Image: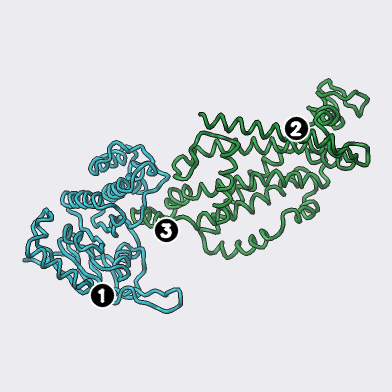
Chain colours: A cyan, B green
Amino acid sequence: MTPQEAILSVNEVGVRFVRTDGTPAEALRSVSFKVFPGEFVCILGRSGHGKTTLLNVVAGLLRVHRGEVRVMDRPVRGPGADRGVIFQQDAVFPWMRVEENVAFGLRVRRFSKRERLRIAREHLALVDLTSVGRAWPRELSGGMRARVAIASVFANDPPILLADEPFGSLDYVTRRQLQMVLHDLWRQTAKTVLFVTHDVDEALMLGTRVIVVKNGNIVEDRAINLPTPRTDDVIATPPGLALKHLLLRQIGLE
Amino acid sequence: MKSGTSHLLGSITILSILILGWELLSRIVTAKGSYGEPLVPGWGYLLGNSLLRMSDYWEGGYGIPAPSQGGSATYAAALLALGGASLVTFERVFFGIVFGTLSGVGLGLLVATSNLSRRLIAPTVHIVRMTPFLAMIPLFNLWFGANTSGIILFVAYGVAVIMFIGTANAVRNVPRVFLDRAATVGANRAAIFRHVILPAIFPEIRASFLLSFGLSWSLVVAGELLGAQSGLGVIVTYALQFAYTGRVMIVAFLFIIYAGLSFALFDAVSRRIIDWHPQVDRRPPDRSLGNIKRLRNSVRRCTR
């Protein structure tokens, strides 16, 4: 096997911050890993253990105190269109119609109006939102807005996609549906995904690899070799359950 | 529809009670001012004597003789006098609002988006905002004169202070995640400013604008009361010297009407621009109650 070129490498990254009472704290201690093209990596961990910090560092939204992040062998110095982000909070611009939201990235990157609308409508169709292109975001449900966020990020076609618990605030059924939408889009586009979640089932359902973060350190980094699609039946097999127990133990349960 | 009608009926009832109550009061309180004019003039006196005597402020023209040149007091002359004075005051309010809004919003954006200008401008403006507006009138009189340009500058100053604070706060309140999202799809600073910051702050700016709109009418009267040669405030000044309560009240009514109309006009126009906003009251326009509620919300948003 020839060693493949990593698309993303995180090298000994440490992030410190100061608590409101003035005491320093370390969100990330010294985190290193490489991600290869086409991987779907789930960053798993409990709240407050550094998952979102890690994602923000990769996105270029947060400065590191030591170490560095490299994307396609260039150091990350800030956010960029090569790393699309699906945010934890609703980031759909309420002052733009749905299709303008999806086309926003293309607009600031100076695509022609005709071209960006064509791409936006194409991506709205992929997430099953064709009929609401001209609607205001306020007219959409939370699940539909999450679909808009997915369409927006794929329309901009970044090689790397970062997702920060994007479905955390949705109801169970909607969450399951959107997991499938994201999974299908990932398979069709062969993007590299870094997906932050606190949900072991979600990580098992989506990931080709799971990295467990605890107290600002990586405590587990493991390929998921379960067959796809990962239905509940697949996860309920002995290897699936064994993995689930392992991950639960690593994030601090049992 | 049904509730709209009942609101209208309610408004009419309350208005009627107020009108009748005033008339009643005018018959009970018959005290007179130092020049013999009733202190609580009834409607007959207001619309007869007081409105008619507005023709005293008519200087002649359009074939309608001025009482000061020997003509008799006519309603035509009275309305022309009021209309002329109103136009002069409109002009001052209008340009005051335009200059004040442009400079206030401009400074607010500058301060909110650049550290250097924040350090340079913010302390000065914050001292200025602590100063009561009315305390500044004498200074404006001395510096710019009690003429149209001086009053325009005074109104502009008051409007600019309100708009500055509103704008600077609005930019600070833009949710972080919107800026982050824009940056991660490849937007540069200029694009973020144009596509994210400007639309995101518009609702808050609109609220500050509604506030400064109301304020600008007060400022223009205050400016005109002290030494101006023309405008509605001057009519009030003269009327005050002779204790013409009725004339003061007529100008006050005019101000209520003007402020209300301009408010409703701006509200209707700007409402279209923020059609996207989730919190906009989209009920059919019901001026009597809706405006109060919206104003209260605006104030709340501004003071938050």
How many labels were placed on the picture?
3
Q: Are marks 3 and 1 on the same chain?
A: no
Quarter of the image for the C terminus of chain B: give it.
bottom right
Q: Position of residue B225 (x, y in %)?
A: 80, 45
Say left or right for B258 vs B287.
right
Residue ID for mark 2? B20
Marks 1 and 2: which is nearer the front?
2
The residue at the far bottom in this view is A23
Q: Are marks 1 and 2 in contact (CB under 8 Å)?
A: no
Q: Are marks 3 and 1 in contact (CB under 8 Å)?
A: no
Say left or right for B278 vs A167.
right
* Spatial CA span between label 3 and label 1: 27 Å
Q: Is residue A78 above or below residue A220?
A: above
Q: Which comes before the other along the chain, label 2 or label 3?
A: 2
Say left or right for B244 vs B293.
right
Amino acid type, label 3: Arg
Residue ID for mark 3? B176
Q: Is residue B52 above or below residue A41?
A: above
Marks 2 and 3: which is nearer the front?
2
As rendered, which of B272 and B99 lies closer to the eye? B272
- Mark 3 residue element: helix
**Circle 1 crowding by C-alpha within 10 Å: few under 14, some 14–19, many from 20:** some
Q: Residue placed at 55% from the left, 53% from the top? A: B167
Q: Which mark is residue A217?
A: 1
What is the chain identity of the residue bearing mark 1?
A
Tell me which corner region of the image, top left, top right, bottom left or bottom right, holds residue A44.
Answer: bottom left
Q: Position of residue B83 (x, y in %)?
A: 76, 30
What is the chain identity of the residue bearing mark 3?
B
Tell me which corner region of the image, top left, top right, bottom left or bottom right, holds residue A56.
Answer: bottom left
